[in-house]
Amino acid sequence: MTDPNQHPVSQSPRGVLLGCAATAVGLVVALTGCSGSDSAGADTVVSTGTTTSAAEFVPDLFNAEFSDGWRDKKTQQPVTPPQRIRITGSLDLTEAAESIGYGAAERRLPKKADATTDSSFPINANSVRMYTDTDNVLRLSWSCEFVGDDPDGENCQKVYRIAFDVSGSEPEIVETTNTVGPQPDELMDSTTLTYPRVVVADPTQLPKSVIGTDRATGATTALLHVVAQPRDGLAKVYFVVTDSLKLYFGELEPSR
């Protein structure tokens, strides 16, 4: 059962995303650009005759996912997104989850078919939500899937919530609860994506069950459950995956 007070994940208002960051060396000004399938522009590289300078890198969570259909501007062949996530750490949430009733019985309810552990979040599409509130607190909530004729399914009608202070270099838990009720409003200057396929600089840090291969480019991808960029323009991102009970955190960086 999902949270009756849960509202759809929102994304910060923005225009059509154009282009990608590029790095030039010496006098080389040829640029591999990438854009959405309906996009015509890209960030440019400006030559001064003796040096070349690229546009300043702006972290953007949308520029790390595959769903925009990035293509080489010259060949129109598919390319990987212009940004990726570099994982800098993770926080095990098992103890915090158990303290609010999400124990071993609840965690064993339906998972991905290739899951390697029972200690994980549920898989149903609307079960997990993460967003930054107006006090800059990162809020994670989930409810596991109800299973008929399963005695443990009854327990998963609760809503599990963990809140984090993300003002420092690593997130800190500031609240755990399983109560249903109103939650603080979402910060509009933030971004949250659900089930995105992204580029991760170090995929070996993630469960093998969430790692895949992009058919168009052959690139290694990671399927995240939900990922949040607490404030637009900042490199920090936080995410969870289905085959784990960890909060992963990292930074956006250029992928080329």
Image (cartoon, helix red, strand yellow):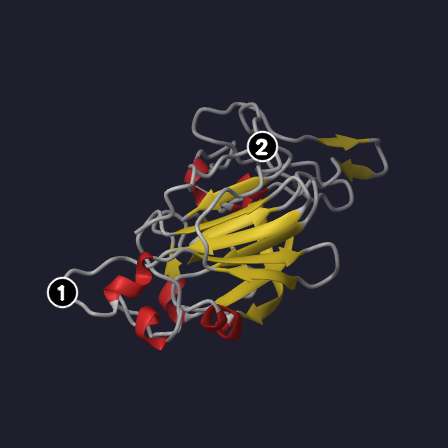
At 52% from the left and 56% from the top, the residue drawn is: 239
Q: Residue furthest left?
A: 149
SS category of the residue bearing label 2: loop
In which quarter of the view is residue 186 placed? top right
Q: Position of residue 120 (x, y in %)?
A: 39, 68
From the image, tell me which residue sits under label 1: 149
On the image, numbered disc 2 is attached to which residue?
19
Tell me residue 157's x, y (percent): 31, 57
Q: Which three-letter amino acid code belongs to the residue tagged 2?
A: Gly
Q: Which SS class for mark 1?
A: loop
- N-terminal of the pair, mark 2 or mark 1, is 2
Q: Is residue 77 visible?
A: no
- The residue nearer to you, when weighing 245 against 164, is 164
Nearest the eye: 94 or 178: 178
Look at 65% across and 49% down and name the residue there. 137
Distance in Å between CA atoms under marks 2 and 1: 51 Å
In-front residue for pair 168/102: 102
Using residue 5 as the reference point, say whether residue 188 is left or right of it: right
Three-letter code for the amino acid on which mark 1 is drawn: Asp
Mark 2 Cα shell of 10 Å, populated few (<14), some (14-19), many (≥20): many
- Whether residue 31 sits left or right of residue 34 in the image: it is right
Q: Based on the displayed image, in which of its 4 quarters is residue 133 positioned? A: top right
Residue at point 57% right, 26% down? 14
Marks 2 and 1 close (CB-CB < 8 Å): no
Q: Residues within 10 Å of mark 1 (few under 14, many from 20)?
A: few
